[in-house]
Amino acid sequence: MQPATKRHWLLALAIGLIIMMLALVIHDFWPEIQLLLHPSESHQQDLRTLINEHKWRDLLFLYVIITLMSAIPGLSNSVICIFVGLCYGPILGILINWFGNMSGNWVVAALINKIQLPAKWQDSPRLNKLRNAQHPALALTLGFMIPIIPSMIVNAACVEQNIPRPTYLLMVAAGVFPASVLYAIGGHALHKGALIEAGIYLAIIILLVLLSKRLESLIKARRSTN
């Protein structure tokens, strides 16, 4: 099987699993979703009670969904990560988000030699910048932090540069941690009904995305002048 064909089959399988697990999670959390759509003071305690009754199966489903969505280019798992923080609180929510995002990158790194990068990415400015970075560990760690850079590109650069496994694991852990924390804490703030606090976390996330886009545009402008 050709690498590109294999990539397409894996992508279809992953999307199918995401849809199936999302359907199961929505089914299991439907009463909570209804309460969230109609918030009130009296619903807060009902929401806490319902969430505490959930089994480990739902936690596992959410972890797998985060993992798969983190691995697929073009998909954002931010809504799922916020939902995890809302349902499981800041501590467990951070851990689920963190390990899910790390696992998604591990999957991509493990498969990168067996699948073919899309043609538009094989010589993309982002990948070339990571390849030629003066400080590879720092550049790749920042690459994992920036939401608009597909994880496949960053992991491809890591594999090409033969980054030692311990170093790679540390870079992934450090890179995905900030977003995992922000999403979980933002979701927990929504659970408490602290809309102002949740708005602050959302503003921070949006600011980080805008800053990363601005940084990328400045880099492109500098390259064009050179």
Image (spheres, rainbow, N blue to C red):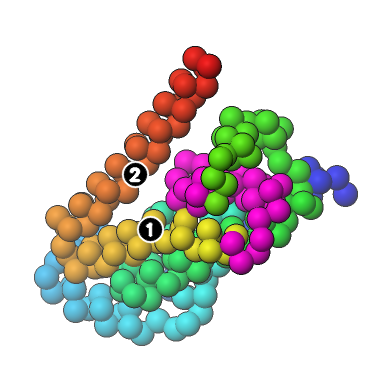
Of 200 and 19, nearer the camera is 200
Count neighbours of disc 2 (C-alpha within 10 A) and say few if under 14, some if 14 to 19, many if 20 or more. Answer: some
Residue 54 part of the magenta-drawn span: no
> Residue 191: which quarter of the image?
bottom left
191 with respect to 208 (left or right): left
Reading the image, the residue beneath label 2 is: 208
**CA–CA distance in space, label 1 to label 2:** 10 Å
Pointer 1 with pointer 2, Cβ within 8 A: yes
Residue 139 part of the magenta-drawn span: yes
Q: Residue at x 14, y 66 (%)?
A: 40
Q: Tell me residue 226's x, y (percent).
A: 53, 16
Q: Residue at x 45, y 71 (%)?
A: 96
> Residue 122: which quarter of the image?
top right
Q: Residue furthest left?
A: 41
- Residue 221 visible? The answer is yes
Element carrying mark 2? helix
Residue flagged by tag 2: what amino acid is it? Leu
Q: Residue at x 27, y 82 (%)?
A: 49
State which region is magenta.
Answer: 138-167
Of 153 and 49, nearer the camera is 153
